[in-house]
Image (cartoon, rainbow, N blue to C red):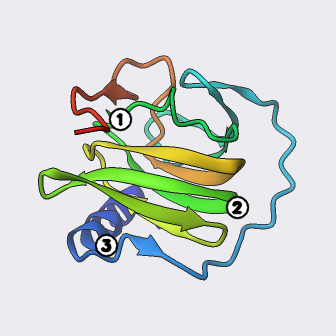
Amino acid sequence: MSTDNLRLEVRKRWDTDSFIETGVSLPDIHYSEPWIPYETYMKAQLITAVPGQQGLLLVDFPPQAAEDNDLHIHPLSDRVITIIAGSGTFLAIRKGKLERFDIYQGYRVWMPRGIIHTFLAGEEGLLVESIHNPFIPFDDPTCLVYSTYHKNQ
């Protein structure tokens, strides 16, 4: 799907409250890219990571990674996250309030750019396939912006 079409699909799903999909077929993963640090506590494999084009990453959240995972925004990039292993919680600001959604293996989250959110891993951690639309390099200051909204509000 083109970058523009994927952006429209992500926004449509978010706006129609169909942004969490269940029963998704899991990708057949045979990636051998090196794991690199991602944000402050995770690691990622960059499968496809060309700036300005759709990126494909594996992201590994350590077990119960709640304390370090602050609410944040990806201002220039939509996300399509497929839960490959583990479980956790997706938190997002919707209609002015913090909402929590339990996520499990086989779930997919469609999230447009600019949404205040975070993911919290469960006891066994969380492994996700993440489409970044478009990919913004991790060292680019527009990749991720931390929010002033606090989880315990």
CA distance separating discs 1 and 3: 21 Å
* Disc 1 target residue: 71
Foreground pick, 2 / 152:
152
CA distance separating discs 2 and 3: 21 Å
Question: Which structural element holds mark 2?
Answer: strand
Q: Is residue 8 above or below residue 133?
A: below
What percent of the width, then of the height, locates residue 28?
A: 80, 66
Circle 1: is it few (<14), some (14-19), or many (20+) Cα within 10 Å?
Answer: many
* Disc 2 target residue: 84
What percent of the width, then of the height, locates residue 19?
A: 37, 70
Question: Which structural element holds mark 3?
Answer: helix
What is the residue that sits farthest to the left in this orientation?
Answer: 96
Circle 3: is it few (<14), some (14-19), or many (20+) Cα within 10 Å?
Answer: some
Q: Amino acid at mark 3?
A: Arg
Residue 43 visible (yes or no): yes
Quarter of image, res 8: bottom left
Residue 13 has which mark? 3
What percent of the width, then of the height, locates residue 146?
A: 32, 25
What percent of the width, then of the height, locates residue 36?
A: 72, 25
- CB under 8 Å between callouts 2 and 1? no
CA distance separating discs 2 and 1: 22 Å
- CB under 8 Å between callouts 1 and 3? no
Q: Nearer the viewer, mark 2 or mark 1?
A: 1
Task: State the residue at coordinates (87%, 42%).
Answer: 32
Task: State the residue at coordinates (28%, 67%).
Answer: 14
Circle 2: is it few (<14), some (14-19), or many (20+) Cα within 10 Å?
Answer: many
N-terminal of the two: label 2 or label 1?
1
